[in-house]
Amino acid sequence: MRHDATDSGKVALITGGSRGIGYGVAEALVARGDRVCITGRNEEALKEAVERLGADRVVGVAGKAHDEAHQAVAVERTMEAFGRVDFLINNAGTNPVFGPLADLDLGVARKVYETNVISALGFAQRTWHAWQKDHGGAIVNIASIAGLAPSPFIGAYGMSKAAMINLTVQLAHEMAPGVRVNAIAPAVVKTKFAQSLYEGRESEAAAAYPLGRLGVPADIGGAAAFLTSDQAEWITGQTLVVDGGIFLNAGVG
């Protein structure tokens, strides 16, 4: 990837940044001149992502988002490599089950919350104490429209994303005025994570969207770049829906 932007002097930590939405966010922030630490579970995929993004600007830390030791290492590595951590993008997430809540294994529900919500809080706590408390910054939580309306058969995921949206509001209130905290709620974005929602029927799935297509990681990357920019300096505690207009169809039919 070419780096045409000058160094912004800002640094971001992006969880789940080796592919999909997290990688799209990393691309957007690197392109504007930020330096970035990305995390991911697969060490080889993480190394490849770092190389594509540019090892002169990006470092990677392998581990599982819900592991507190990994959270500590990721923040420490960011500080060691770049000396600061202005932005946190909580993107790591899981959705290991498809089915009605009435039959949901409660152990699976706990795993979803641990990865999607508790880990986001853990990373926020650590970046706050490592840098943001004294120097300011911004946090962006990648939520989902599943956290804003019923989502059949992915209820546990939707519940966790609703909790993440509330976490955003709570942190925005507590961390003001120095740190702004916002969320992004995407609809279906073309990633491996969401592949089962459109594979083999993309045209049919896209037809439901007023803008005529599914999302791509760059759509979310652009939104995250905005929310971490000076242009958004009077925005906090908000959830930006990036959904190709699908919510416009609510209540129709």
Image (spheres, rainbow, N blue to C red):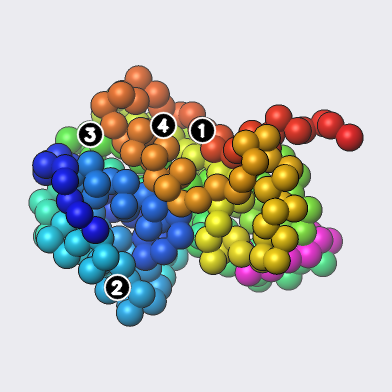
Up/down of 128 relative to 105, above or below: above
Counting residues from the start of the chain, the first of labels 1 and 4 encountered is 4
At label 1, which amino acid type do we have? Leu
Reply above or below: 73 against 230: below
Q: Percent position (x, y) of residue 206?
A: 68, 48
Most extreme residue toward the bottom is: 44
Q: Which residue is mark 3?
A: 136
Task: Note whether 20 is above or below 8 in the view shown.
Answer: below
Residue identified by numbered label 1: 240
Q: Position of residue 95 (x, y in %)?
A: 61, 64
Q: Is residue 206 left or right of residue 77?
A: right
Q: Secondary structure at mark 3?
A: loop
| Residue 96 lies in quadrant | bottom right
Where are the magenta residues, as a range? 94-102
Element marked by disc 2? helix
| Residue bearing mark 2 | 48
Mark 1: give few (<14), some (14-19) or many (20+) Cα within 10 Å. Answer: some
Q: In x, y percent, where is residue 5?
A: 16, 42
Residue at 72% across, 60% down:
201
Q: Is residue 67 left or right of residue 130?
A: right
Quarter holding the C terminus is top right
Q: How many marks?
A: 4
Which residue in the structure is indicated by mark 4? Answer: 172
| Category of crowding for the residue at label 2, using alpha-carbon neighbours closer than 10 angstroms: few (below 14), some (14–19), many (at least 20) | some
Asked whether disc 4 touches disc 3, contact meaning CB atoms under 8 Å apart, the reply is no
